[in-house]
Image (cartoon, helix red, strand yellow):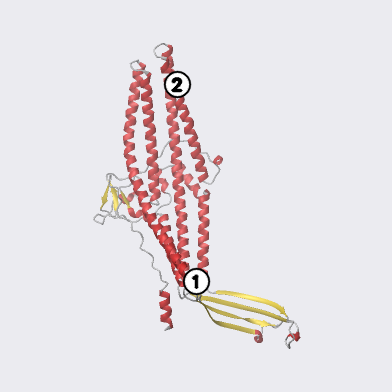
Amino acid sequence: MAAILLAGCAGTTRVATPEPSPVPDNFKEDGPWRQANTTVAPTAVPDAWWRLFNDPVLDQLQDQLVVGNQNLRAVLAQVTQARAALGNSQAARLPTLGVQASATRAGSARADSDSNRGPRNTVSFSGTAAWELDLWGRLSHATKGADARYQASLQDLAAARLSAQATLAQTYFALRAAEAQQALIERSIAIYQRSLELTQARHQSGVAPQTDVLQAQTQLRTAQAQRIEAGAQRAQLEHAIAVLLGRAPSELELAQTSVLPDAPAVPALLPSTLLQRRPDITAAAQRVRAAYAEIGVARAAYFPSITLGATAGYRGSALDGLLSAPNRFWSLGPALALALFDGGARRAATEQAQGAADQATAGYRQAVLTALQEVEDNLVLADRLRQEAELQREAFGFAQRNLEITQDQYRVGTVSYLNVVTAQTTALASERTLLDVRARQINATSLLLKNIAGRWDPAQDAGQPAGAPATTVAQGGGTPSR
């Protein structure tokens, strides 16, 4: 009967966690994508997702990031604290052992027969053991909660590392974009300088008016001012990279390449289940688990705590001969403690734990929705920017051809210098727009890689069995390159 009652009481603290937020089989965007009749096998997520951009300098910076970034060290310290808390919770479920030794001298002012003997000495040496029986699941729920918080801290570390890697990659790409802009401005300055010299020669010969010279000088000085601004932007981005690596800005100097890496192609198949790899989603799910474990701890407080205790040792009036049979003593028995009235504290604690669990559940589901939005945004952005870059390349080619024709016409005197300025401005704006679109395309691709917690596997795009349920989104046309 006692066993049945205890089992029934233990069942009252069992807590069921809610169902996880479902991830849809397919992404929403259906422009260049279509539902694929393909099953994608799960693959391991490699850490070095940035190697898809094939940039050795970025690879070296990423290797230095994990070692020097101070934010990652702070999160790592939180992992250490969570691991220690888990160890402390696990230790609470085990018996405790201890030893105690004491020596006292006591006397009394009372005039009785015992006190007439004067002060007495007491020497004791004993060992104690105690073990709290976890009949109601309080300790087990506390351990589950601590383990879930520890797992969440590990995922927080992974998320912080992933975020720092993405920030470094984006800052690096912005730096290379600024360098490319600098190189473009340098080429423009050289062209404007030659145009100014040509205009001055034509003006001195009486062919061109003074206004053509002023326009050429204005165009040259504007480009020179833009070069200064681009240089300052590049320096600030280099400083930001140094801080991300945990170094002073003066300790880092990157050689200028003025080359933007090519963005890897978005794969034709991208399963929505890749979101399950995201550490922030996993961390949110672990926090839900920890919150529901706290409900079990709060409910277990309604039941008594039962502790088995034992003590054994020696006690005597002198140290000499203390460890002898006449001085030996021992005790063994259970102890039960139960709060009969607490003014509603336990009920309030249970409601508080339930509220925290509801909050954690809502946070987890919101994390899933946010992840879906981020992937959807960068999926469509990466593809649209790819299309935009192709059109912008064609526009730049037309602008370059128009500039060449206009310059030839100006040399023979069929058009004014204003036409040359207009053609040069159009060509420069077109090339700068192309650089901007390429930089945005690279950022969108790197963010997409971050949002799916690692790179995709190009092998997923071919050789998969057909006829399975649609669980991916396919991009029409072509197989991406690695």
* Residue located at (46% from left, 24% from top): 221
Closest to the camera, between mark 1 and mark 2, is 1
Residue 32 lies in quadrant: top left
Question: Do the residues under discs 1 and 2 have CB atoms within 8 angstroms?
Answer: no
* Residue located at (37% from left, 20% from top): 418
Q: Amino acid at mark 1?
A: Gly
Per the rendering, the mark at residue 277 is: none
Percent position of residue 350, x then y = 45, 68
Q: Nearer the viewer, residue 349 or 170?
A: 349
Mark 1 = which residue? 343
- Of the image marks 1 and 2, the number of the one nearer the N terminus: 2
* Residue located at (50% from left, 42% from top): 240
Q: Nearer the viewer, residue 403 or 290?
A: 290
Q: Relative to 26, is 8 above or below?
A: below
Mark 2 = which residue? 217
| Residue 56 visible in the picture | no
Percent position of residue 48, x then y = 43, 49
Q: Amino acid at mark 2?
A: Gln
Classify the position of the N terminus by image quarter. Answer: bottom left
Percent position of residue 190, x then y = 44, 24
Mark 2 Cα shell of 10 Å, populated few (<14), some (14-19), many (≥20): some
Percent position of residue 17, x then y = 39, 65
Element carrying mark 1: loop
- Residue farthest to the left, as pictured: 467
Direction from residue 398 to residue 342 in the image, left or right: right
Q: CA distance from mark 1 to mark 2?
A: 85 Å
